[in-house]
Amino acid sequence: MALHANSDIRAFFEPRTIAVIGSLNEWGGLGYTAINNMRRFNFAGRIYPINPSYKEALGLKAYPDVGAVEDQIDLAIVITPKQKVPGIIDQCAQKGVKAAIIVSDGFAETGESGARLQRQIVEISHRSGLRIMGPNTIGTLNTENGLVTNPYFISYDKIYKGNIAYCSQSGIVGAQGQPLKDQAYPISKMCDLGNKCDVNEVDLLNYLSQDPQTSVIAMHIEDVKDGHKFIDTVRKVAARKPVLLLKPGRTERGAKASASHTGSLAGSERIYDAAFRQAGAIRLNTWREFWEIPRVFINQPLPRGNRIAIITFTGGVGVASVDTAEECGLTIADFSPATVSRLSKLSPQLARNPVDLGPIIPVTDDPLPVLEETIAAVLDDSNVDCVTATLYASSGAETPVYMDIFDRVMKNVTKPVSIWIYGTELGPMEELSRQVQGRGLPAYFDIELAIKALATAAHYSRVKSSLNQGATGISNIRIS
Amino acid sequence: MALHANSDIRAFFEPRTIAVIGSLNEWGGLGYTAINNMRRFNFAGRIYPINPSYKEALGLKAYPDVGAVEDQIDLAIVITPKQKVPGIIDQCAQKGVKAAIIVSDGFAETGESGARLQRQIVEISHRSGLRIMGPNTIGTLNTENGLVTNPYFISYDKIYKGNIAYCSQSGIVGAQGQPLKDQAYPISKMCDLGNKCDVNEVDLLNYLSQDPQTSVIAMHIEDVKDGHKFIDTVRKVAARKPVLLLKPGRTERGAKASASHTGSLAGSERIYDAAFRQAGAIRLNTWREFWEIPRVFINQPLPRGNRIAIITFTGGVGVASVDTAEECGLTIADFSPATVSRLSKLSPQLARNPVDLGPIIPVTDDPLPVLEETIAAVLDDSNVDCVTATLYASSGAETPVYMDIFDRVMKNVTKPVSIWIYGTELGPMEELSRQVQGRGLPAYFDIELAIKALATAAHYSRVKSSLNQGATGISNIRIS
């Protein structure tokens, strides 16, 4: 691997030219679908369909093999029966292709004969310098240039540009398996590493740490190829950008399942865990956290401490969320006398944290100025490091007013805010969530997740300053 | 309180006649809205609007006071300025009204003068036998008779009939604060206890334990009026129906917040926790769990043990979910040789738990029979106590086929199943979820929740048999 420079990884995400090698049958041929996906997402580069049975596909000239293309090829996407893969990879190497994504499966993940095939590929990679992602992967996605190497049908045609990189060792983290449009996740890059015969999590971290579009990295990994190198890399990257890790192996059996799925050693999983944390990786526990927590890092400053203020329209939820805050390593802020007096002017009942607007709103002619003054007062308090506020979604008519409120109160504020959305219909809740996120604020349907997102930001804030001070140990905040 | 029989509580849920005392202004008057809500939900009883300024409302004759109504009144809903409430309650008592829900707020929750007003009400209740719910409550909901006492606008007009009772001390647990229709929660009763000046959690548990429409009780409480009585009641009820408890106070600060919100003693919270668990209450941690976990108890048998099989279409999710299962107190089932051989016939890769159908589905002409045989094989295995299976939601065309599969494989099975749904568009995912739930299977968008639901069922299974054997201690499974 040391043969290859990290900049090689760029070809997987920023190719100017792509060869798609696979079935061009317009009724579900995987090569055809891959090309069609890139068309629908407006891929900015040139695409060359490769298949000896076709002269043309999707209005593009088809070539019998990659060697026949006159252009230089940055990236080859290989979606053929596995037996053909080594020959094709050899042709790619001879052609001087920079990078290949092998979508085909049936390699090391299936047993010895597959592993033998995979070793042939690795050998070509080492010999030629051709970098390989996979096999057994859906490859990459880049919202900047419309790249999506996934050869399965995607039911939507918009992915929101943003600054989260989602990386995985599973096809579930891809446009064909997630409601990316409906959820409006602000994405820079996505990547499925598959079997990691060549390109691995270290290559990816190095690339993403340099990627100007990426400001937070959410990574699902099952195994780590080289623990020491990974830990060194995480430490380097986490000093600049949050690295959030969803990794099985928190339990004995989880570690075993992970090992048998990937062929790595189970024993090492538990040992590395402490080292991951020491290096500044933040461990997540669920897939929902994996998808939703990274949004707290987009467009928002890091909290300077761990004191949270919670504003709800319902006392019951506010009180119940105190446990969540405490369990995540936050503390409930004690409001300053100035804030207490400012809130008391609105209503004496408001001057405590969590702030419950519930009794005030029904008896106020126009509750929105009360909401605005409450958020402003709490944000101004120097005893408060971060805020979870509540919005109620109804018809959608109130959305622009909400947005104006946040535009005003957030203007001179350098504290992060997360939003808990509730309501009586999922449609308006989902739309309000997209709108709020469009303004750069992370929105959640679970108040616990809204709070945990801020706890993760507070945790990373400490990790980052600790790493940048050259400290070797990270303070012991537990994100449970 | 001992003056009143528990059957009094029926009037709060099963009134034949209701007096609604409040503003009848058709532009947002709370009395008007309450009546209108009951009309929209087809309330089966007679409604009497009470307001001296009106002769008529919504086509119903209005009365100046409750005493003027010729009919007997089972339930009064009081939604007036707080100063008027004691007088109205007195009139209700004189009229022989059985039960009153006081929606009005500004009582004990706001300080001494409110507490004084509340004591006047309690005094009337004790003297007359009139049972009172609240004040500061949105009251009750009953899907059996269309009762909904909530005086706030509800944006939908269908709530699914089912067997879950959701009880709370917060207005958030009500039709005006939750997407009950979109989520298709199968509901029997809902109740907000408010300030609990008379009717409290013990009355409610006793009523719900006898309610034939209720088979599981999800209860959010902030304080307990009489700890010993509550624990005795839980023990009695939990022997028949699961009692799931969302109660703040897991942390020191959470207990303090809860105490200051309700006026109870913080110290006792922590002490009671162990007792709650000993009595068989199952503690939940989040609002999402509160809403979604009870569904596992509807229409399904309890698991006989804690061995789970997990079937996914994606290895990455399956492997990551092993940790969740173990952390919830489940163990990953070891398949019997018969199951291994049955699954191996489909593909050698399938014969391990979690079962990953991911590599099989794309290369199978018709993957649905493979899915069916996999679920059937796993359900047949005597080493398996419960199953989480996966469904992919796309256009919705596959929904009837999925339903047929479950109809067949579940026919002779006495094990619970939970479903993890994923897909690329929220609309079809939500629709499939409603369909699956309509067939009696609990569906979740988070695999962790699908697993945790089964863990909760396994936990309750032990609680129930332990309580029914007269044991005093409950085995120590932790639902974390």
Image: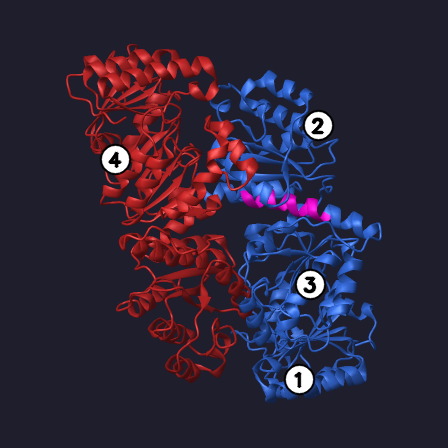
Chain colours: A red, B blue
Which residue sits at x=26%, y=43%?
A209
Q: Quadrant of the N terminus of chain A?
A: top left
Viewer-side residue, B422 vs A299:
A299
| SS state under label 2 | helix
Please give the residue where the numbered disc 4 appears in the rendered image. A42
Q: What residue is disc 1 on?
A: B118
Secondary structure, mark 4, is: loop
**Residue drawn at x 25%, y 11% as measured from the top left:** A64
Instruction: Work out whether residue B303 can be spotted.
Output: yes
Q: Are marks 4 and 1 on the same chain?
A: no
Are there few (<14), some (14-19), or many (20+) residues within 10 Å of tag 4? Answer: some
Residue with the mark numbered 3: B43
Q: Nearer the viewer, residue A151 or B455?
A: B455
Of the image marks 3 and 1, the number of the one nearer the N terminus? 3
Asked if the magenta segment contains residue A182, the reply would be no
Q: Quadrant of residue A32?
A: top left
Please name the residue shown 38% across and 82% down the image. A342
Work out whether B295 lies above or below A118: below
How far is mark 3 from mark 2, CA to CA? 45 Å
Residue type highlighted by circle 2:
Asp
User: Which region is colored magenta?
Assistant: B448-460
